[in-house]
């Protein structure tokens, strides 16, 4: 789908976007593929990747690579949001968080557009009060992800 088609589909399905998601979607470096690709994915917690005390994003992606997994294309975030509208809500889903992934959220592991701390790094999915959200997030290289945080990695591309 083109960017405009992704936005329209999100709107039609009641998906809400935060400012950081809007910034990512509006960035000229955010591109979509011209042909259909199917990405096989897996969702793993930081602890399932072997980091019971947490880890940085660099450590997580290195461990994922050792396991045969890779980062996903950035565009997978909006596509996955549209495919996963029945995401469960966390019991404390309305709680706001700062500096850590919200409870019940699923972060798409994807390469950032650049190294600036001001540029959102990627997308995460969240459901709050029955509303599906596609949210962008900002982070820095030294941020330690919590053991319960869940990230989606690619297991390969078909087609």
Image (tube, rainbow, N blue to C red):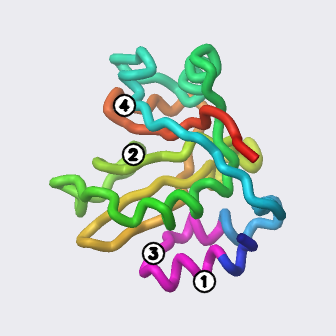
Q: What residue is disc 1 on? A: 8
Q: What residue is disc 3 on? A: 15
- N-term-proximal mark, 4 vs 3: 3
Q: Main secondary structure of the magenta part?
A: helix
Label ID, residue 101? 2
Alpha carbon distance from label 4 to label 1: 34 Å
Provide residue 58's location: percent of width, then percent of height.
61, 25
Which numbered disc, 2 or 3, marks the residue closer to the eye?
A: 3
CA neighbours of label 3 inside 10 A, class few (<14), some (14 to 19), many (20+):
many
Residue placed farthest to the front in the image? 159
Alpha carbon distance from label 4 to label 3: 26 Å
Q: CB under 8 Å between callouts 4 and 2?
A: yes
Which numbered disc, 4 or 1, marks the residue closer to the eye?
A: 1
The residue shown at (57%, 23%) is 64
The verdict on residue 55 being magenta is no
Q: What residue is disc 4 on? A: 146
- N-term-proximal mark, 2 vs 1: 1
Alpha carbon distance from label 3 to label 1: 10 Å
- Can you say whether 66 is above or below 70 in the image? above
Magenta residue span: 6-23
**Label 2 residue SS:** loop
């Amino acid at each position: 789908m083109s960017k405009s088609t992704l936005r329209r589909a999100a709107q039609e399905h009641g998906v809400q976007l935060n400012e950081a998601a809007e910034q990512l979607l509006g960035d000229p470096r955010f591109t979509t593929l011209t042909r259909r690709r199917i990405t096989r994915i897996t969702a793993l917690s930081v602890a399932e990747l072997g980091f019971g005390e947490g880890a940085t994003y660099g450590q997580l992606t290195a461990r994922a690579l050792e396991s045969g997994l890779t980062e996903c294309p950035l565009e997978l975030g909006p596509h996955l949001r549209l495919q996963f509208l029945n995401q469960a809500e966390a019991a404390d889903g309305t709680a706001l968080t700062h500096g850590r992934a919200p409870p019940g959220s699923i972060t798409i592991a994807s390469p950032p557009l650049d190294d600036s701390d001001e540029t959102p790094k990627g997308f995460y999915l969240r459901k709050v009060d029955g509303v599906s959200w596609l949210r962008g997030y900002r982070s820095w290289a030294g941020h330690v992800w919590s053991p319960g945080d869940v990230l989606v990695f690619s297991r390969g591309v078909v087609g």
